[in-house]
Every structure is written in structure tokens, then in C-alpha cells.
Image (cartoon, rainbow, N blue to C red):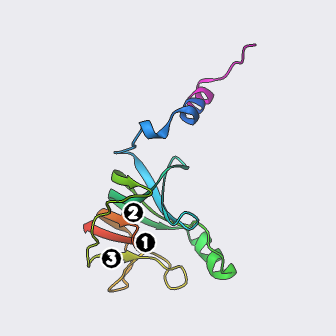
Amino acid sequence: MKIKINESQYRRLLETITDDNEKNHIGDKVMVYYNLHKHTFSISRNSRVITHADYVKLTDVEFRVRQGGREKVVREKSKNVHSFVIGTLMDYCKYPCENLPSEPNSNIVTYNPYKYNSYVMKDTEEPIYRAGEVELINLRNKIFITKQ
């Protein structure tokens, strides 16, 4: 029996059966969010989770909050994925990671949908939308700006 598929279907099929362990995605533009079920970070590319990591380093970073999702969290008091750190993937340590780097004590970025409508600097509560480089470290779900 023969099955005909077009080129885009063939590419999707190849992506599905290709082992993601063979591809490390360094240099790819990704979206990272905290996974409440796995208690670690999920890294997604092209709307697909490619791996889970306890440490992620990104450059050319954008902090994005989908306001509709935030409003739903506030209204229904139930969590959903609506905030992301987007950037170019430079490094990561897959979950579970045994050798996490130490946490810096400054330039901490945080987000709380009940208090803020964007990511903010933890010490000043000033909104932040971009950064040159960040590290996400899963000791206490923290984001650190390492280069403005």
C-alpha cells in the first residue's frame, strides 16, 4: 500500500519521529515558561515543547505577558500559561539538573499576575520588557538579568 503526502506533511512527520535528544536547539529562538505540573521550566519552539530544564540561558530577551490569560487568572483564580521569556537559546541543563549554577543576588526579575501586568524588577517593581541576556534557575523559579 502506498500513501502520498505533501512536502509539509513529510517535514512534520520527520520532526515527530526525530529524537529531540539529537538536536540541542542552541541558537534557536524559543519561549520559556514555568511548568506548574513538572515544577521546572518548559522550553518550546514553534509551539512545541522541546525539553524541560532546570537551567536556561537566553540572549536578546523579551518578557511577554498575554493580558487575556492574565485577566482569566485574576478572574477565575486558576493558573494558566500566559507569560513567557522569549529569546535565543544559548545554554540549558535538562531536568533534573544536578549542577545548577549559583544564584546572583541582584537583577532579579519576577512576575505575579495578581500584583503586576508585566514582568518587573524584584527590588524596584519597575516593569521590564527586554534584556540582553538572562539566566533562569530553577532553585526557586528565578530569572536573573546577566546583561542589560
Question: At 55% across and 63% down in the image, what residue appears?
Answer: 38
> What residue is pinned by disc 2?
62
Give the mark nearest the N terminus, 2 or 3: 2
Binning the other alpha carbons within 10 Å of mark 3 as few (below 14), some (14 to 19) or many (20 upward) gives: many
Binning the other alpha carbons within 10 Å of mark 1 as few (below 14), some (14 to 19) or many (20 upward) gives: some
Q: CA distance from mark 1 to mark 2?
A: 18 Å
Residue 141 bears which disc, if any? 1
Give the mark nearest the N terminus, 1 or 2: 2
Which residue extends farthest right? 1
Q: CA distance from mark 3 to mark 1?
A: 11 Å
Question: At 46% across and 77% down in the image, what residue appears?
Answer: 111
- Percent across and percent down for residue 4 are 69, 18
Question: Is 2 in the magenta?
Answer: yes
Element type where label 3 sits in the image: strand
Provide the residue span drawn in magenta: 1-11
Residue 108 bears which disc, if any? 3
Question: At 36% across and 66% down in the image, what residue appears?
Answer: 137
Question: At 43% across and 71% down in the image, what residue appears?
Answer: 141
